[in-house]
Amino acid sequence: MAQAQTGLLSGATPLAVRMRPTSLDEVAGQRHLLTPGSPLVNLASDVTGEQGSVSVILWGPPGTGKTTLAQAIAHSSGRRFVELSAVTAGVRDVRRVMEEAMTTRDLYGQSTVLFLDEIHRFTKAQQDALLPGVENGWVILVAATTENPSFSVVSPLLSRSLLLTLQPLSDDDLGVVVDRAVADPRGLGGRFELEAEARATLIRLASGDARRALTALEAAAVTAASMSAAAAETGEAETDEAGDEGAGDESAGDESAGDEGAETGDEDAAEPTAPPEPDKPVITAEHVALAVDRALLRYDRNGDEHYDVISAFIKSVRGSDVDASLHYLARMIEAGEDPRFIARRIIVLASEDIGMADPQALLVAVAAADAVQYIGMPEGRISLAQAVVHLATAPKSNAAYMALDAAIADVRAGRIGRIPKHLRDAHYPGAKRLGHGKGYQYPHDDALGVLRQQYAPDELAGAVYYRPTEHGNERDVSARLAKLRRIVRGVE
């Protein structure tokens, strides 16, 4: 039994590859792209002409079926199919495919589908090499990418292609994928039983990624087979020991057994007894947990998920949801995000969203960044958590941030004015003759340390940029600021 299971699982081809659909009917999920008459359905059929000749860019997270759709098209379509990977291909390979496509079209009237995986890895020059073939219809391009095409694909290629967005698979879709892999001869061939709890665990850990679900299933099956074989060997050893102890009694009864056998007749004695069918190994949630150490996080530090998670993190801290903030922090840490990047975002948060409502927040954020730099990970995560809790629970104010933006807007609009003469530099020879520094009053000479004096240019006299809130420490700042403005500007 152990050898059979090992042979089933030890092939060079991974389960996820063996179970790749050969037609669009087998594809799980993405039903919004597979309606009758859709570009992908037309590509997979023998439709010719304009309807079946549109190039497409498939954009979606890993494991959502981009390569699967392309290969299903290859199996179903009568078109010539060529596959390139942007990881290994170059401009020369692209031009060779274009030349072959033109030859095939002219000689045999057969169109060519070019599947280009990971197109975002192509440089601008490499992507530009695709343009003549796509524009003139030499090839029908099916390109796949996990990164936002708006940033990773050149505009001329985008404008000549349909952008189709793939969604993470639903739990129901993943269930179909897992169940098929357990039963299908290409997969586990019905040689395992999958407990309901184990199935649910696989679906949860996959996070919408079919490839991850199948990879985890295969690993869990190997674990289940190994543990089942070990248990069987232990049971056989115990049976052998028990048999040795009872050998004497069995030999004593041989004579009477023989007589009974003679009385029953030759027909019954000749019938062989079929060996019992061995039990199937059962894949349990424990096997899944042993095979998969942690949730298979989808997180590409150069992709959309990177920006989505950090965006959710920032907005959760800003919104004072400390638990959600810690959740997104944990996702970044577990996905291997650079802790220095996280620390920098926390520092920005401290000034942008908390500001003068809690000036200590910036000190805490900087201290956390220093701690990460000094002690590293994994211990640095504790300092990051402390800073996140402080910032998420602190009173919030963006008044300082908004004040600066308002001032910058005036400067960019040309509202700058000339610096008052009494504020200009007077240290160099001839400055006094120009009136620089004349009439300047030194605030420290005043009993209050503050006095009436114009500081802004004439054009901006009376301009108000900083408008403190009533949150946290800024409430005290607001009261003091009102007094300062009355003294400095002489207004109520």
Image (tube, rainbow, N blue to C red):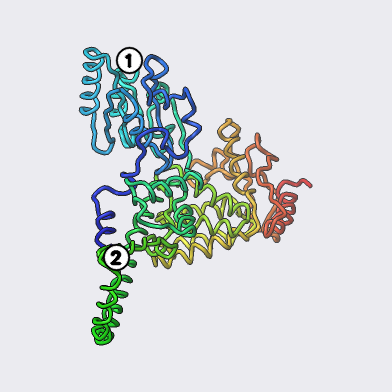
Q: Secondary structure at mark 2?
A: helix
In the image, residue 239 lies at what x, y percent? 30, 78
Badges 2 and 1: C-beta atoms under 8 Å apart?
A: no
In the image, residue 218 lies at what x, y percent? 34, 54
Viewer-proximal residue among 244 and 36: 244
- Residue at image position (44%, 62%) is 285
- Residue at image position (38%, 31%) is 153
Q: Which residue is mark 2?
A: 268
In the image, residue 255 lies at what x, y percent? 24, 82
Viewer-proximal residue among 253 and 404: 253
Q: Secondary structure at mark 1?
A: loop
Judged left or right of residue 26, residue 317 is right
Give the class, few, some or many, for how many residues have Cα within 10 Å of label 2's Cα (few <14, many ≥20). few
Give the class, few, some or many, for how many residues have Cα within 10 Å of label 1's Cα (few <14, many ≥20). few
Residue 172 against residue 368 in the figure, above or below: above
Q: Locate the N terminus by quadrant.
A: bottom left
In the image, residue 250 lies at what x, y percent? 27, 83
Q: Which residue is mark 1?
A: 136
Q: Amino acid type of disc 1?
A: Asn
- Residue at image position (64%, 48%) is 399
Question: Which numbered disc flags the more N-terminal residue, 2 or 1?
Answer: 1
Residue 72 against residue 373 in the figure, above or below: above
Q: Amino acid type of disc 2?
A: Asp
Viewer-proximal residue among 219 and 337: 219
